[in-house]
Image (cartoon, rainbow, N blue to C red):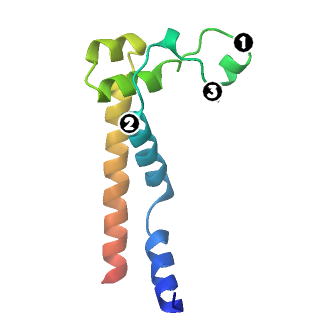
């Protein structure tokens, strides 16, 4: 690889907002996940309340709700967590906002 190519690639990667990468990656991973019910899943979690042994958490089921929504199971999505649909809308709007910001920032750099 030439130095010029490396510089161009680094400049291009530098222009993408890191938050946009996280949101898009998270949504894509939830969209391709296998939809399962709460009682069917025994998995590792980062939730501090679940790791303390508490059975109830205000965010418990939110990821499963989003996964169910992406698989077209609206009733199951609402059953898993009622904030799943608003979360997808809010995250989607955030992705669009960050995309527009990144686009405008890159357009201004070129001109």
Mark 1 and mark 2: Cα distance apart in space: 28 Å
Mark 2 nearby-residue class (10 Å; few <14, some 14–19, many ≥20): few
Looking at the image, tell me whether mark 2 or mark 3 is earlier in sequence order.
Answer: 2
- Residue 84 image offset from top left, x and y in percent: 38, 23
Image point (60%, 23%), residue name: 43
Q: How many marks?
A: 3
Position of 39 with respect to 69 (left or right) is right
The percent position of residue 80, horizontal first and vertical second, equals: 42, 14
Mark linked to residue 45: 3
Gap between marks 2 and 3 measured at Cα: 18 Å
Residue occupied by mark 2: 32
Above or below: residue 16 compared with residue 94: below
Q: Quadrant of the image for the C terminus? A: bottom left
Residue mark closest to the camera, 2 vs 3: 2
Name the secondary structure under disc 1.
loop
Residue farthest along the right direction in this orientation: 52
The image's mark for residue 66 is: none
Residue 53 position in % (x across, y down)? 72, 12
Measured as percent of width and height from the top left, residue 101 is found at 35, 60
Residue placed most toward the observer, 89 or 30: 30
Between marks 3 and 1, how big is the CA–CA gap? 12 Å
Lower sequence index among marks 3 and 1: 3
109 relative to 46, above or below: below
Residue pointed to by mark 1: 53
Q: Secondary structure at mark 2?
A: helix
Residue 54 vertical placement versus 10 (above, below)? above
Pointer 3 and pointer 1: residues touching (CB < 8 Å)? no
Mark 1 burial class by Cα count in 10 Å: few <14, some 14-19, many 20+: few
Left or right: where 45 falls relative to 76: right
Looking at the rendered structure, the secondary structure element under dot 3 is loop
Q: Quadrant of residue 29?
A: top left
**Sequence-first tag of 1 and 2:** 2
């Amino acid at each position: 690889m030439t130095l010029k190519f490396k510089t161009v690639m680094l400049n291009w990667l530098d222009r993408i907002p890191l938050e946009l990468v996280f949101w898009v990656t998270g949504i894509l991973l939830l969209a391709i996940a296998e939809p399962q019910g709460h009682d069917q899943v025994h998995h590792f979690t980062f939730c501090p309340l679940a790791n303390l042994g508490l059975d109830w958490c205000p965010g418990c089921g939110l990821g499963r709700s989003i996964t169910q929504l992406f698989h077209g199971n609206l009733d199951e999505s609402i059953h898993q967590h009622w904030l799943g649909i608003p979360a997808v809308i809010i995250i989607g709007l955030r992705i669009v906002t960050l995309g527009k910001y990144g686009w405008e920032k890159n357009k201004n750099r070129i001109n």
